[in-house]
Amino acid sequence: MHGGLRRGMFFVFVALGLGPVWGFRYFPTQDGPAHVLNARVFKVCVDPAAPESEFFERRLSPIPNWAAAALLGALTEALPPRIAEKVLISLYVVGLPLALDYFLAGVGASGASALGLLFVWNSCLFRGFYSYGLGVVLLFLVMGWFVRRTDGLSAGDTIWLSLLLLASYFAHLAALLITVFCLLWLTVTVPVARLRGIVLVLLASAPATLLTFQYLKSTSFFGTPEDSSAISIASEEARGTLARVVEAPAVLYHEIFTAHGGIWLLGLVILAMSVWFWDAEDEGSSGSARWRSSMFALSATLLLFFVLIPDTLRAHGGYLKGRLAPVSLLVALGAVRSAPRGRVGLRHGVALALIVANLGLVVRHVAKTNREIEEFTAGVAWVRAGETLVSIKAEPGPRSVVDLFSSDYYCIATNAVCLSSYEGGTQHFPVSFRPGVKHRIRKNLPGSFWADVVLAWGAPEDRVPQPDEPYSEVFRRGRLRLFRRLRAEPRNPGSLPPP
């Protein structure tokens, strides 16, 4: 296949990746609605007249996770909230394959860029980890920039690298740690001036390291008299190492293809990688060979970390495996030899089929989830601006594609106050609950409900407002039920536009 045509097809498929984002009303994520809503809460909670000011306050300390919050805050100044979210997701969906392509070109493996499209739609994206996704884009941009300077960093390069690592810190702490590890790996395994390279990388990472230490200390990462440290939690979790080794292939598949059905797709990915290795030739890049063993070993090391680490450190952080899974396989593409010039081989056909099938499965998942979100948000017209809303979880059973964080959709559409905001109860976001609010919100239980609106989605009868409580059921459709506290007559549902 001619190089220009191959590049053209790569960019076409990058653009097609925007289809699942813009072709539907909602792009379904777990945490996305909370991020969008809290971009507004951050702006208005300092106004004493705003209902949010009773419950929320700003956290202006230099914590990670600022990237998505800041971008959403800026985007929502000019765009409707749902459109602003789609723009942010698009930055990741387009930015990751382009950043990966930049990195792979630097190590002489640009022919493998198309396979990176398979790993864009991973569990972290569908969980709504937007800041981490931006951090992964930065990871490959930084690595691509770095591999072009492995003969030696200048003083100016060190300053630029320090700024890039600071940006990575404000995207996500896990992304920063992975980035620094990868840079040190590249410094040790490739250049001649290893010692100088290590010193300069450590010097460049010093500002981000200081911020990291301060952040971990402020969140009790190292433990307090009341709480266990993350290190002790990791030690406890390490007892299940053997089980994690056995379960690793299934977990890896779930974290990469969470929206897809059938283990067959992972088998095809492995086949595609094997075919790409087989019957391939270098394009004459004198430097490509020196990178191949380094990239392969780095990928294997990251996969080993994926197998051995626990998935959660509880209050100190979770979904650790999900964050490592796509990165370890994307790095492996740096060990793939570039495709021969002017030849169409089996590897091209397999790769094309994989990309098309993968994108089709993503579209199917997004379409299915949109139908359920439409069902979930059917009662939005019954919620008024300024009202407080709390949601009730469904009974245990098969996992619904709609998470209860989706109650934020109601508050995004109506400017109501979402009391089920998980971000406010953590120490990791720019918006937090005021002192005492978290405990007060937890009192929303049968017999003591006080929120203006109670949203129930498949909830059992003993979890919703009881007949002797001052609530009226104002809306019911399928699994959805809305209860309003009896302080005023329910408004006409036609008086509010749909979300």
Image (cartoon, rainbow, N blue to C red):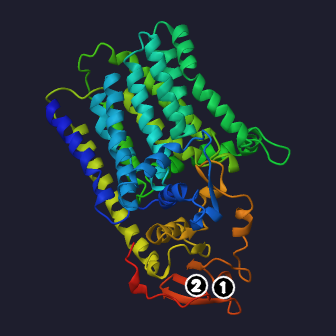
Q: Which amino acid does label 2 sit on?
A: Phe
Q: What residue type is labelled 1?
A: Pro
Q: Is residue 338 left or right of residue 293?
A: left
- 394 and 47: which is toward the camera: 47
Q: Name the residue under label 2.
A: 483
Residue 301 versus residue 481 in the image, above or below: above
- 174 and 299: which is toward the camera: 174
Q: Is residue 320 visible?
A: yes
Q: Which residue is drawn at 54% across and 83% down?
A: 482
Q: Residues within 10 Å of mark 1 (few under 14, many from 20)?
A: many
Tell whether label 2 touches label 1 (CB within 8 Å): yes
Q: In which quarter of the image is the N terminus?
A: top left
The quadrant in which residue 231 appears is top right
Residue 29 versus residue 89 in the image, above or below: below
SS assignment at label 2:
strand
Q: Name the residue under label 1.
A: 465
Residue 199 versus residue 349 in the image, above or below: above
